[in-house]
Amino acid sequence: MAYTTINDPTDYFNTVLYTGNNTYPRTIDGFGFQPDFVWAKPRSVAYGHMLFDVIRGVGNTNFLDTRLSDAEGTSSVNANIDSFDSDGYIIDSPSSTDTQNASGLTMATWGWKAGGTGVSNTDGSITSTVSANTTSGFSIVTYTGTGSAGTVGHGLNNAPEMIILKRRDGGSGNTNWFVGHKDLTSWGYRIFLNVNLAEAADSDFLANTAPTSNHFSVSTDISTNGSSGSQLAYCFHSVKGFSKIGSYTGNGSTDGTFVYTGFKPAWVMVKRTNTTGSWIIFDNKRNTFNPEDKFLYPNLNNAEGTLTALDFVSNGFKFRNADTFWNASGSTYIFMAFAESPFTTSTGVPITAR
């Protein structure tokens, strides 16, 4: 069997950088595919995150901000995607302060290919709308909460290993971003994307039930299944040579922990789980050579931070710093990573490190 089914990871995930020019409409291209899920963050200033996807649609009211519990379209950032296209997306002028394309603003934007226009899914007891890419192990899921325990179809062929959920309409007050991950203590634990807290037990979050190959479970929590609530889930599972969802233990050394992925990483997001600590994102476009020393925080609006952190190598990543955000001695961390190149292609060609 071939090592990987994805020889070119940029067919399914890519990072694009650009500098704002205050001209509209502005085409952001270079992804190599239509990005069904777009995550953008200003690097040079302390503005928030902007998440769009093909199911929730375009416009200045359909973005979400990972650092906030706010409902859809109510963040202090001003984002306005006008359309998704075959190589990227088009942004239009915002209604007020420009956090996407102001002159001189440096931006990082990450794009994932799902399955295009959403389709109805009845694999669970709660009907969902799903845009799924079974090759790359990623799906976008929306559904309307029932307030009663049930299951939600995710459209993938394998059980998700990481699920990010957000109630879009705020519900009874604003609601946090919930994250379930295979390497938390169990699926009866959760962690938040928008705050820096440690993992905690929460049997109501995903009904204390591991996802299956066709659905995930929800209980009665208003954040994940509130009655008539507009719900969103991003679902991921590892795909050999393309993506890896896992965990590691820090060693507190500049000769840091090595984390095997089976590919040269293009993008890595980590979070300390045994105590407080921010989420951290690294990518291969903002750092074109080792060591990786530029990072952004999904739970904060901070401008890009700079500190020698880790190396991207041919089959994983290795830490070069004992900072507690990513390598405290004895601390546990979860991660999700996507590939620049598989360790070995489907024809057996090995990939070298940087």
Image: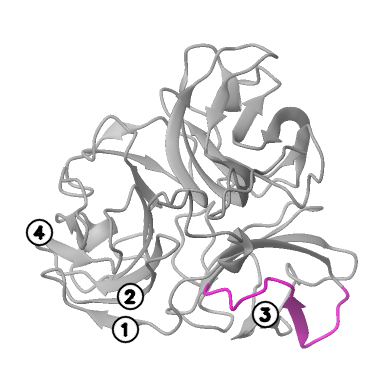
Give the residue number, with chain letter if any, for mark 2.
130
**Distance from the alpha carbon under mark 3 to that under mark 1:** 22 Å
Q: Is residue 27 magenta?
A: yes
Q: Nearer the viewer, residue 349 or 215?
A: 349
Q: Nearer the viewer, residue 38 or 87?
A: 87
Residue 240 lies, in percent from the top left, at 45, 48
Give the residue number, with chain letter if any, for mark 1.
119
Residue 88 lies, in percent from the top left, at 67, 78
Q: Is residue 198 magenta?
A: no
Question: Do we see residue 297 in this rendering?
Answer: no
Mark 4, other Cα within 10 Å: few <14 / some 14–19 / many ≥20: some
Q: Is residue 232 left or right of residue 263?
A: left
**Distance from the alpha carbon under mark 1 to that under mark 4:** 23 Å
Of pointers 3 and 2, the one earlier in the residue sequence = 3
Mark 3, other Cα within 10 Å: few <14 / some 14–19 / many ≥20: some
Point 42% across, 29% down: residue: 273
- Is the residue under label 2 in contact with that under label 1 (CB below 8 Å)? yes
Question: Type of residue at label 2?
Answer: Val
The stretch of residues the image draws in magenta is 21-36
Q: Quarter-wise, where is residue 197 in the image?
A: top left
| Circle 1 or circle 4, nearest the eye | 1
Question: Type of residue at label 3?
Answer: Asp
**Distance from the alpha carbon under mark 3 to that under mark 2:** 21 Å
Give the residue number, with chain letter if any, for mark 3.
87
| Depicted 311 relative to depicted 56: above or below | above
Point 36% across, 32% down: residue: 199
Give the residue number, with chain letter if any, for mark 4.
149
